[in-house]
Amino acid sequence: MAAAQPASAALPAAHQELIDAAEDVARRFACGDNHTVAAAARNADGRIVTALNAYHFTGGPCAELVLIGAAAGQGAYDLTAIVAVAHQGRGVIPPCGRCLQVLLDYFPEIEVLVGRGPELRAVPVRELLPEAYVWADHQG
């Protein structure tokens, strides 16, 4: 098992709390090849929602997408920050392109935690997808 990455001294406590929540879910519930990534997000009201990916050879949903559904099921519709971590102590991982696009469309102001160790930082999703197609811009 790889060692967990160290917390960034510059990272706000609220963001570190998200990382800790995702790592806790990964440590406690990630198992086998079906659940290898956990995500945690904060809603505007301060609630933290967590989720695990559901790997499937047909392209099962990433942890970030499962989290969006879990958040909606709890009435959390205003996510402000999100992070994904890989199981077995592998630390923070960036969202895939599909997840970034969905996050941009659902939560255009959300911050995404990316980087490693002292390089961890919160980046607005728009900066991670420059020149992105924005679904809402093309609706009637």
Image (cartoon, helix red, strand yellow):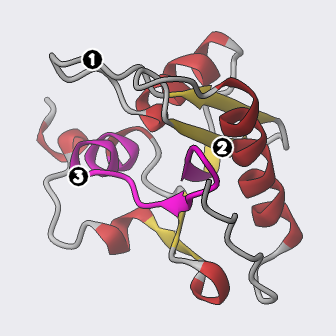
Measure how far apart labels 2 and 3 are at the Cα level: 18 Å
Q: Residues within 10 Å of mark 1 (few under 14, many from 20)?
A: few
Question: In percent of the image, x 49 and y 25: which residue is there?
Answer: 35
Q: Which residue is mark 1?
A: 56
Q: Which residue is mark 2?
A: 41
Q: Amino acid at mark 3?
A: Gly
Toward which corner of the image does residue 116 lie, by quadrant?
bottom right
Residue extending farthest front: 1
Question: In percent of the image, x 63 and y 24: which residue is there?
Answer: 71
Residue 2 point in image, percent of width and height: 61, 61
The tag earlier along the polypeptide, 2 or 1, is 2
Secondary element at tag 3: helix
Q: Amino acid at mark 1?
A: His
Given contact means CB atoms under 8 Å apart, are the residues at marks 2 and 1 in contact?
no
In this rendered view, identify the residue nearer to me: 103 or 99: 99
User: Is residue 128 found left or right of 112 in the rendered image?
Assistant: left
Residue 69 point in image, percent of width and height: 51, 18
Q: Which residue is mark 3?
A: 97
Secondary element at tag 1: loop
Q: Would you place residue 85 above or below residue 8 in this image?
A: above
